[in-house]
Amino acid sequence: MSKIDHSLFDTHESAFDPGPCPQCQAPLQLRHSKNGPFIGCSHYPTCEYSKPLHDTDNTELTVIEGSHCPECESELVIRKGRYGMYIGCSNFPECHYIKSNKAPETDKIECPSCHKGHLIKRANKYGKNFFPCDQYPKCNYALNFTPVAHACPKCAWPVMQEKKAAAGAIWQCPERKCGHKQPAQ
């Protein structure tokens, strides 16, 4: 005799009742796709209503005392959202203020290719940092390592990049023809 009560694992459609479809009043049902389960209308081809099974609603965690929204003067709160923690207005549906978490850049490095833009830090879809020109798509210049505002002593290219090596940090010229390396200063 098994010690597991198999009746707990039996699922019946009657146990899950999300109610009627708000568009056509047909019953809603649990559906599956390549992105996972969702709630959809039972009259699918004619009615395309769907909603996620789990709402990714922003959860308000803590009110920040003494700080006010610059747009509507409501209190600021720490929230947990789809992309992690952030600071936003407590008057959310009416006010969409979100405090930027970017630090002010004091030492901007001019793009050596177009001389109009600056090199900024960005992350690719895998989370690795790179430093493209902020004038993209007009300028396609980018570095894979941290730029340093120091001219190359060999070819006079206005920017070098800092790399980590076994002996410590080094500066290397990003120009393929040059490739000059020197210890970081």
Image: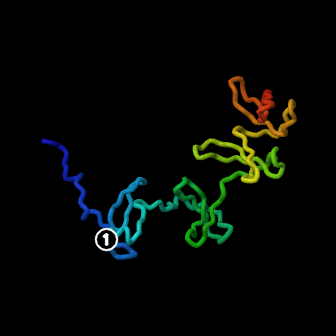
Q: Residue furthest front?
A: 45
| Residue shown at the point (19%, 53%) measured from the top left | 7
Tell me the element at label 1: loop
Compared to residue 98, the image places residue 128 above or below, namely above
The percent coordinates of residue 82 (x first, y second) are 52, 56
Q: Quadrant of residue 83?
A: bottom right
From this viewpoint, which residue is outermost toward the top? 167
Q: Is residue 134 left or right of residue 92?
A: right
Q: Identify whether 112 is placed above or below 156.
A: below
- The image position of residue 80, as x and y in percent, is 53, 56
Outermost residue, bottom direction? 24
- Quick one: which residue is furthest to the left in this view? 1
Q: Quadrant of the N terminus?
A: top left
**Within 10 angstroms of label 1, few (less than 14), some, or many (20 or more) residues?**
some
Q: Position of residue 180 (x, y in %)?
A: 80, 28
Q: Quadrant of residue 177?
A: top right
The quadrant of the rendering that contains the C terminus is top right
Given residues 2 and 38, the one toward you in this image is 38
As drawn, is 176 to the left or to the right of 95? right
Q: Amino acid at mark 1?
A: Pro
Return the residue at label 1. Answer: 27
Work out whether residue 163 or residue 144 is closer to the camera in this orientation and state it. 144
Q: Position of residue 81 (x, y in %)?
A: 53, 57
Location of residue 42 with respect to 170 vertically, above or below? below
